[in-house]
């Protein structure tokens, strides 16, 4: 196929830090986004630019990665169709070893079909392990922004990895500056641990206007995802590095559990079906995660050489309903029922089998809700969150026990959901105060959910939980660096999200040494 012409020279630094304008985009059809991201002198584009949602990559393997885009010249149209016709549209793609695209390594064509929201998921094969690549798309006479991605290292490679992770981005509650700050850290990989988008309609006091009603239909969910994807900071983070993603609850609705909605709702299964379809359409996922009715295969495992195994979990589709009416409860003995599960039996076996067979230096569970025991009620009374692993005690203890008794050399849990930064040492069983630590848990705060936050140190809760070593109520993300000798975690915080362009600083850093599951302040 003919080579895709590049509208203007792009530097590597521009790809990483310049936003969609510097990523090779030109004017986007006269919309507000177009005006913000226009690149003077870069050439002429069609008015109906289909690449308003940017580009992304994900699920990297040693020889390939998934490339994603979704065509939407009118991204936030109420019908969820993005201004696209009811027909498949051919999309050309190119992958190069350099940002100028002078060294094309692969190219091809995919079909953006209406039944998948005109999304494109290109599963590349035959690339070099541990290599950096640049990619772009062309459709309907328009050229997409340029994205940077990389393949996973060869299976026997150790090396090192800088990886950032976050969760919980509510469009209405603030600006997505944390995504831009993550991109500026130039990570090799980004993890998103759930609540990528929220189902709620606009509310009084929102910082930014959320479009559409509470999401219930496929059109609603497509429109909501599209509004999020028009954010230039989110687009930059997607274009900077490959992502590994899992959902939590708000991609469908708050606190759902398998086939049980938060509140009685005869239409919940239809809602779940269309929500998961829209999620797949808008994420750089492989075909193995394409939904089948109300189900989607989300839990999966990716290796980063012999350095890290990422075990990505699903704590929504297979869980028992929350015990004792959900929420924070005291005196709830049902949570200790050995048959209660947040993972389901099949996924639990998959986790434990993965621990048994691992040869990685670090084994990481990327998952959604607080794993360690956390007593949220100061004083003699104990209160636990029934939506987290505290509502499924036996399930948690079996996995913590497997982490201790398997081939796992260094067990790490990465968590989202709670809109706060926390750090904790995982006990083999938290009911025994003398139980030894078997791993560490790093919990990221939100991108925006919860608003600006404050500097309350939550000292009462920390006193109740001596295995918890850190807490911060600001928005941001966690930056990690894995090496063969240690894991370093930097808790990055923003002073505000109610205004644009907040700076980021490190509130606290911890180091975990190889073979020693303890949180050491850096």
Image (cartoon, helix red, strand yellow):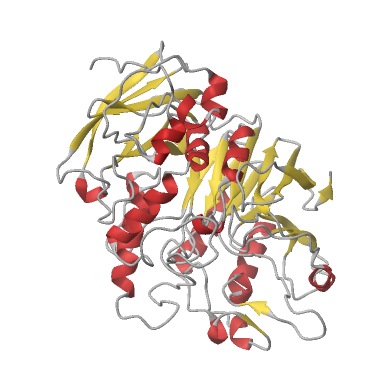
Left or right: 44 as drawn, with respect to 395: left
Residue 246 in the image: state x and y as whole percent: 48, 54
Vertically, is 212 above or below 84? below
Q: In which quarter of the image is residue 359?
A: top right
- Say which of 131 and 9 sits in front: 9
> Looking at the image, which residue is at 46% across and 35% down?
36
Can residue 113 be seen? yes
Vertically, is 361 above or below 146? below
Q: In which quarter of the image is residue 201?
A: bottom left
Can residue 92 be seen? no
> Looking at the image, which residue is at 40% across and 77% down?
260
Residue 285 in the image: state x and y as whole percent: 39, 45
Vertically, is 107 above or below 272? above
- Say which of 241 and 145 sits in front: 145
Residue 30 in the image: state x and y as whole percent: 34, 35
Left or right: 459 as drawn, with respect to 323: right
> Looking at the image, which residue is at 62% across and 51% down?
497
Counting the numbered discs, the total is 0
Left or right: 510 as drawn, with respect to 248: right
- Say which of 331 and 116 sits in front: 116
């Amino acid at each position: 196929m003919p080579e895709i012409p590049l509208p203007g020279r792009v530097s590597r630094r521009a790809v990483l830090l310049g936003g969609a304008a510097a990523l090779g985009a030109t004017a986007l059809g006269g919309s507000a986004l177009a005006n913000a991201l226009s690149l003077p002198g870069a050439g002429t584009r069609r008015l109906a630019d289909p690449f308003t949602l940017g580009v992304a990559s994900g699920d990297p393997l040693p020889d390939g990665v998934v490339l994603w885009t979704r065509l939407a010249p009118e991204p936030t149209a109420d019908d969820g169709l993005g201004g696209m016709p009811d027909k498949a549209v051919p999309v050309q793609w190119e992958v190069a070893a350099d940002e100028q695209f002078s060294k094309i390594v692969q190219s091809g064509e995919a079909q953006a079909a209406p039944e998948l929201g005109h999304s494109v998921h290109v599963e590349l094969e035959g690339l070099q392990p541990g290599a950096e690549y640049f990619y772009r798309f062309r459709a309907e006479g328009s050229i997409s922004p340029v994205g940077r991605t990389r393949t996973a290292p060869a299976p026997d490679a150790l090396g090192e990895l800088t990886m950032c992770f976050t969760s919980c981005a509510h469009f209405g509650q603030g600006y997505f500056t944390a995504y831009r700050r993550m991109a500026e850290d130039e990570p090799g990989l980004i993890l998103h641990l759930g609540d990528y988008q929220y189902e709620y309609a606009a509310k009084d006091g929102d910082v930014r206007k959320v479009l559409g009603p509470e999401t219930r239909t496929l059109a609603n969910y497509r429109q909501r995802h599209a509004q999020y994807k028009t954010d230039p900071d989110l687009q930059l983070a997607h274009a900077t590095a490959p992502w590994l993603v899992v959902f939590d609850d708000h991609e469908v609705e708050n606190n759902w559990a398998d086939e049980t909605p938060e509140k009685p709702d005869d239409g919940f299964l239809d809602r779940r079906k269309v929500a998961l379809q829209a999620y797949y359409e808008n994420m750089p996922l492989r075909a193995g995660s394409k939904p089948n009715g109300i189900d989607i295969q989300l839990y999966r495992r990716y290796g980063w050489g012999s350095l890290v195994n990422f075990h990505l979990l699903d704590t929504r589709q297979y869980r028992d309903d929350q015990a004792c009416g959900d929420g924070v409860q005291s005196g709830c003995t049902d949570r200790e029922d050995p048959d209660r599960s947040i993972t389901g039996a099949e996924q639990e076996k998959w986790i434990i089998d993965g621990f048994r067979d691992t040869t990685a230096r670090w084994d990481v569970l990327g998952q959604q809700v607080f794993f360690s025991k956390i007593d949220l009620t100061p004083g003699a009374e104990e209160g636990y969150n029934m939506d987290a692993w505290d509502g499924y005690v036996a399930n948690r203890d079996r996995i913590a026990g497997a982490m201790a008794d398997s081939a796992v050399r260094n067990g790490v849990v990465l968590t989202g959901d709670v809109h706060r930064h926390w750090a904790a040492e995982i006990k083999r069983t938290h009911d025994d105060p003398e139980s030894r630590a078997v791993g560490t848990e790093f919990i990221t705060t939100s991108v925006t959910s919860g608003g600006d936050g404050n500097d309350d140190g939550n000292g009462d809760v920390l006193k109740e939980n001596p295995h918890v070593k850190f807490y911060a109520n600001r928005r941001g993300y966690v930056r990690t660096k894995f090496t063969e000798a240690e894991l370093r975690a930097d808790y990055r915080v923003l002073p505000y999200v109610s205004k644009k362009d907040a700076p980021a600083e490190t509130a606290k850093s911890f180091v975990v040494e190889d073979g020693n599951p303890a949180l050491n302040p850096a």
